[in-house]
Amino acid sequence: MGCCCDEEDDDILKHLNPSISTQTLTLDPCSSSTSFSGDCSDVISPMNSHFSALTCRDTLRAIFEKLPVPDLARASCVCRVWNSVASDKEILSRAFRAPWKLKRVVGDPVSGSFWRDNGLGKFAISHRIVRGDSVASLAVKYSVQVMDIKRLNNMMSEHGIYSRERLLIPLSDQNVLIGRTCYVELDAYARREVAVLYLDGAGPDRKAESASLLQRTTSLQARKRVIHSLRRSMQVDDGTAEYYLSISNGDPRAAFSEFSGDLRWEREVGLS
């Protein structure tokens, strides 16, 4: 005597896989599971090409939109269809934003691996350097460690701050991200792509960056030559030479005079 839902089960299976006829389905009276009398190619499985429900792009999209970043990375390795859906920018961006409640992410990353990690270390605050800033003062202002700022910006010495227009500040509070917009940027000093947050809400000035790019490129070599000359004259490292040049408004003679004055003072007080 069969179960009252036998006919229903057969109809469901036929919708999932029309190639399987009801004649190949048998119900073991001693078991609650349905068995197949056909070969292994008729078995319904997520990896079976006949299982059309898991190769339908609309179905996959509805599922993938609910997955976190690590699971999307795993799904993209299953097959080409899954990879193409899991690699959709809208799906990746939504999964990237979801844990932090970000409003949006602006920009196209150079590397596809950018989306595979959305840990807090992926984000940074852009701080435009003004006169009087130091790594220590910025660490206090943003409640982070000095070494974390140096590590993120690849700084060997604190003097390096004066040769840059901005510093990236690591996040210490994830709540800062809520409702914010981040910009995907390839930072030249950090040497990696970062999701940058602008606390003033203005965002990067793309036009100004493009206009000043040529000027920075042409003046960079000239500045390096001046720093190299100062380094040899002062017998110091590049960071120190760059520091004295910056506090002297780019005047090499004034920089050397400042250095000589500090050196005399150190000798007078017995520091050297």
Image: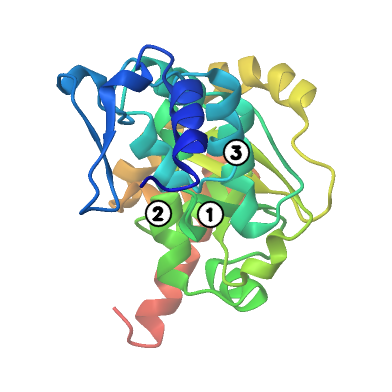
Closer to the N terminus: mark 2 or mark 3? 3
What residue lies at 34% left-to-right and 17% top-to-bottom? 20
What residue lies at 49% left-to-right and 44% top-to-bottom? 5
Residue most toward the top? Answer: 19
The reply to whether discs 2 and 1 touch (Cβ–Cβ < 8 Å) is: yes
The reply to whether discs 2 and 3 touch (Cβ–Cβ < 8 Å) is: no
| Residue type at tag 2 | Met
What residue lies at 27% left-to-right and 21% top-to-bottom? 24
On screen, residue 104 versus residue 46, left or right, reads right
Which residue corresponds to mark 1?
A: 161
Locate residue 73: give its quadrant: top left
Closer to the N terminus: mark 3 or mark 1? 3
**Foreground residue, 247 or 203?**
203
Q: Residues within 10 Å of mark 2 (few under 14, many from 20)?
A: some
**Foreground residue, 42 or 174?**
42
Q: How far apart are marks 3 and 1 (CA)?
A: 42 Å
| Residue type at tag 1 | Ile
Q: Evaluate whether residue 25 shows in this view.
A: yes
**Foreground residue, 226 or 145?**
145
Disc 3 secondary structure class: loop
| 90 to 21, vertically: above or below | below
Quarter of the picture holding the C terminus: bottom left
Locate residue 191: give its quadrant: top left
